Image: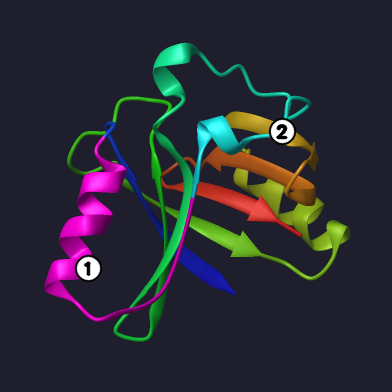
Amino acid sequence: MIVPTLQFPGTCQEAITFYEDVFTITEKNISHYRDAPPNSGMTITEDMLDLVMHASITICGTKFNCSDAQRDAIPGNMILFNVFMKSEDEVHQAFEKLKINGEVVIDLGPQFFSKLYGSIIDRFGIKWQLIT
């Protein structure tokens, strides 16, 4: 399953509130950086605590993930795709192919939210997050 992800420059919470007013949202879950466990492996600064680490909302039947970007979010690079795969082998194979002439953002490894996760920008500039 592929889920589009919208990234924002610190305005994710505001955007979700706006989209709730515009569309019918049937599901909403929001986690802020302050909600991350102490052993998350992430460097979280004081100014990040109220930012959205991960949110999922369902707009008109389509699931979207949302977050405040760790990199600059500018129009044109504010969308990425979360790919939920069934096996670690699938994740490894896809990651290896995507990284050819691409840029590894977060190398493959276990995370507190997944057995295996990696983030990569492919050679066409599209950002992918691969997750089992």
Gap between marks 2 and 1, in whole Å? 28 Å
Q: Is residue 16 left or right of residue 26?
A: left
Q: Is residue 86 left or right of residue 83?
A: right
Amino acid type for the residue under numbered disc 2: Pro
Q: Which x, y percent locates residue 122?
A: 50, 43
Res. 125 in view: no
Upstream in sequence: badge 2 or badge 1: 1
The C terminus - image quarter: bottom right
Write the residue at 54% across / 31% down. 34
34 vs 98: above or below: above
Q: Which residue is mark 2?
A: 37
State the extent of the magenta-drawn residues as a range. 11-30
Task: Tell me the colour scheme of the image.
Answer: rainbow
Examine the structure image and report whether residue 20 is included in the region drawn in magenta. yes
Q: Which residue is mark 1?
A: 20
Res. 4 in view: yes
Q: Badge 2, how many Cα within 10 Å: few under 14, some, many 20+?
A: few
Which secondary structure lies at badge 1? helix
**Between 57 and 37, which is closer to the camera in this rendering?**
37
Q: Which x, y percent locates residue 102?
A: 54, 35
The N terminus - image quarter: bottom right
